Image: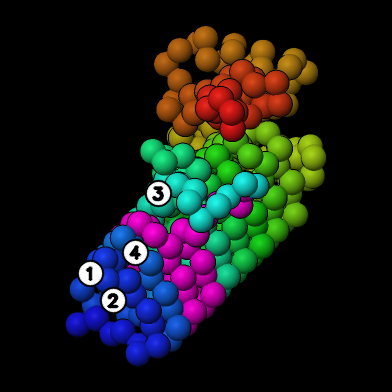
């Protein structure tokens, strides 16, 4: 049985699953769909048409699915959707915005830990098993792949892709794509430092897979020839381990944009 605090306000068109807990002074807006076993602590705001899966926990002060931060927004502005998966922990004062496109989506996957004061902008994709630490700011149109760990107060430019199982050190300012499995630190420009060994373990990779990634990293980043040239040479060999291929694909794709942001080469005109 769901438990709804008497001070909570829930629009009549919102749909709540089984055993949902809604705490004091929460607000759930029109058209929201809430899965089973979700918990909303005090003062949580859920915007219009937000879709939330099962067993998510929202801590006090979250604002989820309100209008994107854009100039020219009016009460009549129409925006897209925000979908959140299952078993996410979303801590105090997190903000997540829906798509700026009526037919678009911001997507948060499953089993993510999103810590205090994190902002996730419009049209982002946050995959699964990520950790976004306190104060991290993710601009619009970014993709954070599975297993990424962002330390405190990491700042991410629009249209950035952070590759799977990579790690960004605290206060990193990231303005170009980051390949999978690496550690990045520094600020405008950030630098790739080494393989994220802890990430390889968290990913459950075998010793052989880890060896392939380490060998590829040395070839890509430690030789005197340019990185893109190395990536193309490695890709041309064929038969690559799937994780090594993910690394080379990331480097080659990011080269298609002059600032190293592959997703920006796909952006819709006028935005």
Q: Is residue 130 left or right of residue 258?
A: left
Query: Is residue 16 visible to the viewer in this orientation of the structure?
Result: yes
Residue placed at 26% from the left, 66% from the top?
13
Residue placed at 60% from the left, 61% from the top?
118
Residue 20 numbered mark, or none: 2
Q: Marks 4 and 1, Cα distance to the nearest angstrom?
A: 15 Å
Discs 4/3, front = 4
Specify which label sits upstream in the sequence, 2 or 4.
2
**Is the Cβ of the residue at disc 1 closer than 8 Å to that at disc 2?**
yes
Query: Is residue 147 visible to the viewer in this orientation of the structure?
Result: no
Q: Can you identify the residue that label 4 sits on?
A: 30
| Residue 232 drawn above or below residue 176 | above
Task: Specify the segment rendered in magenta.
Answer: 42-70
The stretch drawn in magenta includes residue 233: no
Task: Give the camera-side residue of 97 and 187.
Answer: 97
Find numbered disc 4 in the image and state the secondary structure of the residue it sits on: loop
Q: Can you identify the residue that label 1 sits on?
A: 17
């Amino acid at each position: 049985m769901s438990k709804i605090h008497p001070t909570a306000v829930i629009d009549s068109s919102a749909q709540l699953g089984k055993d949902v807990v809604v705490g004091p002074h929460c607000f759930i807006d029109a058209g929201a769909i809430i899965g089973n076993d979700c918990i909303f602590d005090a003062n949580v705001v859920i915007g219009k048409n937000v879709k939330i899966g099962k067993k998510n926990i929202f801590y006090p002060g979250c604002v989820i699915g309100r209008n994107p931060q854009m100039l020219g927004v009016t009460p009549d502005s129409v925006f897209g959707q925000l979908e959140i998966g299952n078993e996410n922990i979303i801590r105090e004062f997190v903000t997540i915005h829906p798509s700026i496109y009526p037919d678009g989506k911001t997507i948060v996957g499953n089993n993510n830990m999103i810590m205090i004061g994190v902002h996730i902008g419009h049209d982002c994709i946050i995959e699964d098993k990520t950790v976004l630490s306190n104060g991290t700011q993710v601009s619009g149109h970014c993709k954070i792949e599975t297993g990424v760990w962002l330390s405190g107060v990491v700042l991410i430019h629009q249209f950035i892709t952070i590759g799977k199982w990579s790690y960004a050190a605290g206060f990193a300012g990231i303005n170009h794509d980051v390949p999978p499995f690496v550690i990045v630190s520094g600020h405008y420009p950030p630098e790739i430092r080494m393989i994220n060994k802890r990430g390889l373990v968290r990913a459950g990779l075998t010793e052989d897979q880890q060896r392939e990634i380490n060998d590829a990293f040395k070839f890509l980043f430690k030789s005197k020839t340019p990185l893109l040239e190395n990536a193309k040479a490695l890709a041309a060999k064929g038969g690559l381990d799937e994780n090594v291929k993910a690394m080379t694909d990331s480097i080659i794709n990011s080269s298609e944009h002059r600032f190293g942001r592959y997703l920006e080469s796909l952006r819709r005109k006028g935005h």
